[in-house]
Image (cartoon, rainbow, N blue to C red):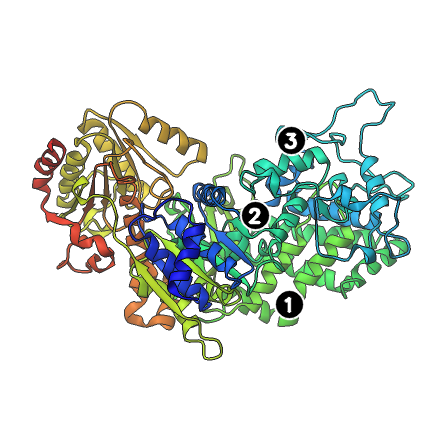
Amino acid sequence: MSDADAEARWRERFGFDEPYENQADAIEAALDAGREHGYLAMEGPCGTGKTMAALTAAATLLDLGVYENVLVVTPVKQQLRQFVDDLRTMNAGSDDPLSGVALVGKRDLCPYGREDVFPADAGVHDRCEDLRENTANLVEAGDGAARSDGVDVDDLTAIRTDEDVEDAWWDPVLARDLAKSARPGRESIDQSTLETAGAASPYVPVQPSAPEEFDEETPLFCPFEADWYGRNRGSPVDFSLGEERVVTSDDFLPAAVEAGTCPHRVQSVLLGEADVLIGNYNHLFDPQSRPLVEGVVGEDTFVVVDEAHRVEERVRDLLSERVGRQTLRRARNDMSELVARANQSEGAREQVAAHLSDFDVTLSDVKRARDFYDDVDAWLAGEIAERLDDEFESERDWPDEDVELPLRDPESAEPDALTRWAEGEGYTGDSWRRLVHVGMAVEDALDEEERATVCAPVGRVFTNWWEHDHATYFREIELEHAPAEAPNGAPWEATYTPGLVMYNCMPGDAVRDVLADLGGGVLMSATLEPLDVFREVVGLDALADDPDDPRPVTERAYDLPFPEENRASWTVDARAFTARNRGDPTRENANATREQYRYVLRSLARSHGNVLVCMPNYREAAWAGDYLADAVEKDVLVDSSSSDDETERLKRAFFRGPGKVLVTSTRGTLTEGVDYDGDKLHCCAVVGVPLVNVASPRVRAVRRAYADAFGESNAFAYALTVPAVRRSRQALGRVIRGRDERGVRVLVGARYTADAPRSVVDYLGREREEFVRMTPDFLPAQFDAFWDE
């Protein structure tokens, strides 16, 4: 196909009359990458139209038959809604609209979980899995084939899976009867039904048990699941329910509830038929969530990774694992309970053994796993007490914050202390590897209805603890600062809640593996530069250099498209705002650095309109807020690490009324994914480079891993400096959100200047040439001059 034909195709799909500046180039770059089954890394600031560009290219590739479907993932809910809106806009002008579905998690879709029908300590995911298994057993066809009651299944099903229902192992008639058994009885006085999402289901508002004719033990089951089998695992909802054939949970959740079918199953059926799937990072990168799209997403899928500057951080979080001490004890207690049950009688022992044998596990395996967890618990308590004694002179010196106790030297990829101890105690690799199977077997044998068991997830973590290499995963004890109201036990238990952590140091390896299994795509953000660094750390260069299946990787970076005269961009050459220079913010001090920054903060806060001041962390934000509250006449709001509700309250207060000052951490939630559009923000200042704590053991381990992968000279920049500067750039991006908006962007600190020691200028992207350097004394006059215009 010629370039002219390709352009004609995408212009037919494009949702507006004409593309923005750079938007056409972005579409064509994505098309070129997609046709070669490669990847495009694209930086496009606000106003580029990245969402519509990516969707237009993806739709065109579907039209050309290059791909079968599209997966969009974004970590920001607002962006997910934007993709839904843009897909609907695209469909509104098309004779061949694409079907789309926005994905949400099981916890948001389960009717019983949403209405707290499950026991308080029962997890929604685990409870649903148990009910699904019970329901499947109850609807199984006695002769291995589906029966028929003369009802045309097509009349019951808007969308069916591709399975051949002629050979189904379930009985749809039996399933429909089972679902009907959960409806209020005709003779019952209480005719109420379960309601959720503004919809009334056909079923009683409590967990129903199967009638005796289905099973003598009358196990709990899910009527919504049974109804799904009754429809031959189809859906009563199709894409016509959604605006312009794009359905969200607002559409299919109440419709599924009213029809009496499991909303999560409805979503699964829809995503199997959809052209475009829109979800979050978990659906692509989380091993626990990805099964939802397995079999649907693969080498024929074009992927769009939005907010791609966050891939490293989010995938690292998804792949890191933690087991708290209380969870470890629960797993041990679950195993003790099963052993005690087996010891009640010979018959009980045989019954337990029969359950375990399905997993090739013996009662001796369970006892050994129980003893292992008991020994680990004792080792953990002793290790914590010893390490705190070694590192602090007394309890008065224990920090009022989380504490990391590394289990190996962060600078050396050697086996950790727990692994070495266990080997010395005779717990070999086979013992660790069997823990996940033992955990699943114990959960199956206990089959608890009133509480959730934790043996399987704990077993999985400990199996991974043994299997994962020591360079990629850093092991440590994490002490969460959580003072107990009624302390007991060892002194440290009154202050900290401990856990064992495996911290992922190299998320790029996992990202590369995921992308290698897909057909091609776009990774995009407003802050990806330096693109060569991004390509390297997320594994794109490794894909391009794969000798067996090299994948082309291209890149694009665009300028901010709004009028340059509407914005001022300044670099304030003040002393470097480092921990060494500024000292402790909680202590009274009058050193030269703090005194200079008091002047800078005062100048910023007194400028026109709403001012967002971004400090390196929340401690510094508290210091700045305390100072400004007495130094300026404006209202000063101070953000902290708080709940989502409190953050929303703070934003509303900031946007309401005359100009205010909002002080936050550059690493906080108010500097990314928040749209300060219109007249909500007039100035954003980033004070200092928001590096994480470089002395943290896990950060040192990441730096060591990056040095091994990318070279010692690149380690600090790749692991720490570049992510920190992207945070700064994200914060500055909050100011100008539209063509008619005006505002000031300020970077404060010597490291943002070109000739300073450890300068970060090279990481500021294409706009760095716009920033005008000045000393703090010039700030007030420059503000006056800009706003007077």
Residue 396 in the figure: left or right of residue 96? left
- Residue at image location 25% in from the left, 41% down from the top: 585
Label 3: element kind: strand
Given the image, on which type of amino acid does mark 3 rest? Answer: Thr
Of 108 and 417, the residue lying toward us: 108
Badge nearest the viewer, 2 or 1: 2
Q: Is residue 50 above or below residue 743?
A: below
Question: Can you tell which quarter of the image residue 165 is in?
Answer: bottom right
**Mark 3 highlights which residue?**
196
Q: Earlier in the sequence, mark 2 or mark 1?
A: 2
Of 322 and 505, the residue lying toward us: 505
- Residue at image location 13% in from the left, 42% down from the top: 596
Given the image, on which type of amino acid does mark 1 rest? Answer: Arg
**Mark 2 highlights which residue?**
99
Residue 760 in the figure: left or right of residue 165? left
Query: Which residue ends up furthest to the top in the rendered image?
Result: 189
Circle 2 packing at 10 Å, graded few (<14), some (14-19), many (20+), is many
Label 1: element kind: helix
Q: Is residue 670 above or below residue 356?
A: above
Question: Can you tell which quarter of the image residue 42 is in?
Answer: bottom left
Given the image, on which type of amino acid does mark 2 rest? Answer: Ser
**Mark 1 highlights which residue?**
433
Circle 3 packing at 10 Å, graded few (<14), some (14-19), many (20+), is some
Badge nearest the viewer, 3 or 2: 2
